[in-house]
Image (tube, rainbow, N blue to C red):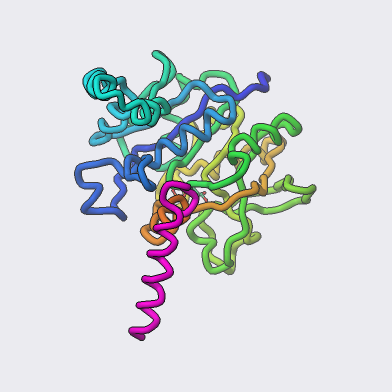
Amino acid sequence: MQRHVRKAVFPVAGLGTRFLPATKAIPKEVLPLVDRPLIQYAIDEARAAGIDEFIFVTAKGKSALEDYFDSAPELERSLREKNKTDLLAALKPTEVPSGGIAYVRQQEALGLGHAVWCARRLIADEPFAVILPDDVIEADVPCLKQMVDAYAEVRGAVVAAMEVPRAATASYGVLDVASENGQLIRMKGMVEKPKPEAAPSTLAVIGRYILPPSVLETLGQMKRGAGGEVQLTDAIAEEMVEGRPVHGFRFRGRRFDCGSKAGYLQATVAYALSRPDLRDEFAEFLSHTIEMARAAE
Ligand code: G1P
């Protein structure tokens, strides 16, 4: 099998109901952390891992995403005329070479596994990455790059993994661990959203995957699982049943669940504090605000 991972799938068909009413008219993937949309963080991470083909699985109401990665001749002309080179530079990461980005529609909301399956013809017969843009990971070495490096050492699927409190297992895919070797976890199973008492471990899957094309075939035959949806977790678990290796990977970095309001706010604060142009003023504002809140208690 080809080893180099060139393609990434971004499932972005979700309705984003947790951010209503904001997401009534805009996709949640274009909500900004400071000044960059969530999807930009995901694309940058894929690029840093050597990926140059981006496949979006979209749905109705997501056209803002296509516009975001399109050229903007009028805007660029106006910025050029005003000599705004810094703003022109800020637009650079939104440019994707022609043919580098493709969109497929998921016509029915049948789950993450079904969304990935919708991209099967574009992925064809090679290993591919999946990035869930809700999971934003701040790291010195971008998470997917860490995983691509790990993938070069092991065969089969690699999924990002992180310890979560046992009470939280019902929000995640959870690993059934066979053995551990440094950051790599050899798995013997994987369960989608188990209740805390039934969870085989407290190691949760985070939204980064490197998968062999056999997963796509499995997805095509998959019955609906947890929540009545076709689960990616179940198709990856099937890899192990077929005797193919699957590894969890303890990435280095800080993950924010930007699918939740609390996680989104935490990410906003963390990214604002990491920006030299905002840090000092923002940190002062935060400590002042906390002091005032304490004093009012
Ligand atoms: C999805 C996956 C789950 C994974 C999670 C990570 O769930 O199905 O296995 O642990 O992403 O964020 P969702 O959050 O879409 O319900």
* Horizontal side, residue 212 vs residue 296: left or right: right
Which residue appears farthest toward the front when viewing the image? 83
- For image coordinates 45% across by 30% down, the residue present is 117
Rendered position, 204 above or below 130: below
Magenta highlight: main SS: helix
Provide residue 225's location: percent of width, then percent of height. 47, 48
**Residue, x 62% and y 61% (percent of image)?**
202
Q: Nearest the camera: 106 or 277?
A: 277
In this image, 280 relative to 255: left or right?
left
Point out the image quarter for the N terminus: top right
Which percent across, then down, holds residue 188? 70, 48
Does the stretch in magenta take in 105?
A: no
Image x and y of residue 54, in percent? 45, 25
Residue placed most toward the observer, 206 or 137 = 137
Q: Quadrant of the rendered structure where residue 210 is?
A: top right
* Residue range highlighted in magenta: 273-297
Asked if residue 279 is positioned above or below residue 233 in the image, the reply reads below
Residue at the spot 56% in from the left edge and 52% down from the top edge: 254
- Taking the magenta stretch, the answer to whether it contains residue 290 is yes
